[in-house]
Image (spheres, rainbow, N blue to C red):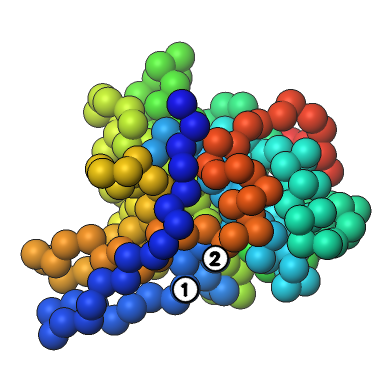
């Protein structure tokens, strides 16, 4: 059943115990690591963040471990903003990974990718989800995931905004402990959740909060142009080749 996007935001009143409000949501940070989680469809919700980046003239490198990148949707978002789809396409590079080892290798190669394509933002999907593959032994998955975290840490000095979109919290099992390790490395932590009363999608800021402080709902509304173009958050992936790096 398709989800519906909230029509209004829900700001939380500032209190003495509340943390400072973060930057505006539905956008990646100019630098640092933002982790988004909370819903099974999280790996495809990154599409909401692309138009703002591209409209600002920024270039985006996407490492798509979830195989959710949808070029048809990107074209629709471009038309919604009155921008030629070819202009959007020029500013995006996509590299797909189908195993955890491939995703690790892509993360290790990011500095080399940046030498050829000066991206301002990096989007990663299915981290650490791909490392939950039962066909991969625990030790091998742990080593590959550790190398992926090392690769992310190596990107910290760069003026690169990084967004990881993960469905890890939907999984059960000991490897789910990988997600807290990723979250511990994040500079921002955001959770997608459904409103219990009306079933609408909300984005909650979970990062940098003092103990005992509840979720700080900064904004529950995606950019209107993106919401209209996608018809809510019922996004669909398309198996269509885009400008893609091979590993």
Residue 191 at x, y percent in the picture: 35, 52
Q: Mark 2 to mark 1: distance in Å?
A: 7 Å
Residue 146 at x, y percent in the picture: 42, 44
- In the depicted structure, whether residue 243 falls above or below residue 176: below
Q: Which mark is residue 160?
A: none
Q: How crowded is mark 2: few (under 14 residues within 10 Å), some or many (20 or more)?
A: some
Side of 114 where 140 appears, left or right: left
Side of 60 where 207 appears, left or right: left
Q: Which residue does the image show at 83% across and 43% down from the upper left?
A: 243
Q: How crowded is mark 1: few (under 14 residues within 10 Å), some or many (20 or more)?
A: few
70 and 121: which is toward the camera: 70
- In the depicted structure, whether residue 36 falls above or below residue 41: below
**Residue 104 can be seen in this image:** no
Q: Which mark is residue 24?
A: 1
Element under disc 2: loop
159 and 143: which is toward the camera: 159
Q: Which residue does the image show at 65% across and 31% down from the upper left?
A: 237
Q: In this view, which residue lies farthest toward the left?
A: 212
Circle 2 is placed at which residue position? 27
Residue 182 at x, y percent in the picture: 37, 50
**Residue 24 can be seen in this image:** yes
Side of 86 where 246 appears, left or right: left
């Amino acid at each position: 059943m398709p989800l519906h996007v909230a029509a209004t935001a829900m700001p939380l009143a500032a209190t003495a115990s509340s943390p400072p409000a973060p930057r505006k949501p539905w956008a990646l940070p100019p630098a640092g690591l933002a982790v988004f989680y909370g819903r099974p469809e999280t790996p495809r919700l990154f599409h909401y963040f692309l138009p703002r980046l591209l409209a600002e003239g920024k270039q985006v490198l996407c490492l798509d471990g979830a195989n959710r990148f949808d070029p048809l949707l990107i074209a629709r978002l471009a038309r919604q903003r009155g921008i030629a789809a070819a202009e959007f396409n020029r500013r995006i590079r996509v590299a797909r990974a189908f195993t955890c080892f491939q995703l690790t290798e892509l993360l290790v190669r990011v500095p080399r990718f940046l030498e050829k394509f000066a991206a301002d933002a990096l989007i990663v999907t299915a981290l650490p989800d791909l490392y939950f593959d039962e066909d991969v032994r625990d030790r091998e998955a742990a080593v590959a995931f550790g190398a992926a975290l090392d690769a992310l840490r190596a990107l910290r000095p760069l003026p690169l905004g990084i967004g990881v979109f993960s469905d890890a919290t939907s999984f059960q099992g000991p490897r789910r402990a990988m997600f807290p390790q990723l979250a511990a490395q994040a500079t921002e932590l955001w959770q997608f959740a459904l409103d219990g009363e009306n079933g609408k999608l909300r984005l909650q800021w979970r990062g940098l909060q003092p103990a005992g402080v509840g979720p700080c709902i900064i904004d529950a509304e995606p950019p209107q142009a993106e919401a209209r173009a996608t018809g809510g958050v019922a996004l669909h992936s398309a198996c269509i080749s885009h400008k893609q790096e091979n590993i």
